Image (cartoon, grey):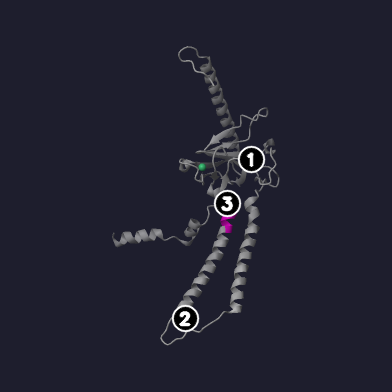
Amino acid sequence: MTLAVATAVLGSLVLTPAALANFITPKSGGSPNADAIASLYKITLYIALVIFFAVEIALAYALVKFRKRKGAVASQIHGNTRLEIGWTAAAAVILVVLAGLTFAKLSSIQNPPNSGPGGAELGEQNNLVYASTSRKLPPNGKALNITVVGRQYIWQFVYPGANEADGLGAPYSYEELVVPTNTTVSLDLVSADVVHSWWVPELGGKFQVVPGYHNYTWFKVEKPGIFRGQCAFLCGRGHARMIATVKAVPPAQFEAWLAHQKELIATANAEAANARAKLSAQAGAGAVENP
Ligand SMILES: [Cu+2]
């Protein structure tokens, strides 16, 4: 390898401090909870960096200053009460500061804000069937509630819009979750089989999807965009394929998409019912018993 190539390779490996910070801190920018997680992480990281360098510099100083020299005799020290109280108290102060910062930020991570002006109009779908202490709703109680079903190996998203009579007929989609911008989206996470983990890094932290339980999270996307995620819990041999995409579109476009989706599903269901009726009406050699 020539020197020029080696320099180029080395040059590409060296990151600017900003790029490095993005590389080692959580992704954010999609939703306020992800932003709050990232900023809390950065504050903790910077405090840790200051302490790390202070300790390392003090260590290097001591190593050089008190290195072995000819004729030098090490002083024999047995304890130093002031120093010991000092570092114990300093560590406790750091701990208390970090805990205080974490608790101060926690509410902005856990509690969703109201939808912004121009967000999707939310009707009666917000009435909760089951009261829950773990589901957080915005102060005005209005959120677009979507059920996320984890199953080997695909994510299913069930939107509001079921028939009032039987609770069936809700529009749904697989793999791609379409949401309106400027609208608080509350997710009800359930599993159809094994444990999965819902994770779209730019929209917040991971949430375990456990059979028999309901877990809740939320996000609110300001601008149209696409956010990619991936099941974050090894759930079987197809785990790597279990991807998720969140597509945020303007509310009007969302309403149109949802209506179209409902129509497509109704048409497909009608066709399937037709095909089933034909099959069960068959007679003769090709007869199929319909279970
Ligand atoms: Cu999975």
Q: Which mark is residue 144?
A: 1
Please tell me whether residue 37 belongs to the stretch shown in magenta: yes
Q: Specify the amino acid type for callout 1.
A: Leu
Which of marks 1 and 3 precedes in the sequence? 3
- In the rendered image, which quarter contains the C terminus? top right
Q: Is residue 63 left or right of residue 195?
A: left
Query: Could you tell me which residue is drawn at 59 percent across and 58 percent down?
Result: 40
Q: Position of residue 224 (x, y in %)?
A: 55, 43
Is the C-beta separation of discs 2 and 3 under 8 Å?
no
Crowding near the residue tagged with mark 3, few <14, some 14–19, many ≥20 C-alpha atoms within 10 Å: many
Residue identified by numbered label 3 = 34
Query: In the displayed structure, does residue 39 sit left or right of residue 283?
Result: right
**Element type at mark 2:** loop
| x and y percentages locating residue 203 in the rendered image | 56, 48
The residues colored magenta run: 33-40
Q: Earlier in the sequence, mark 2 or mark 3?
A: 3
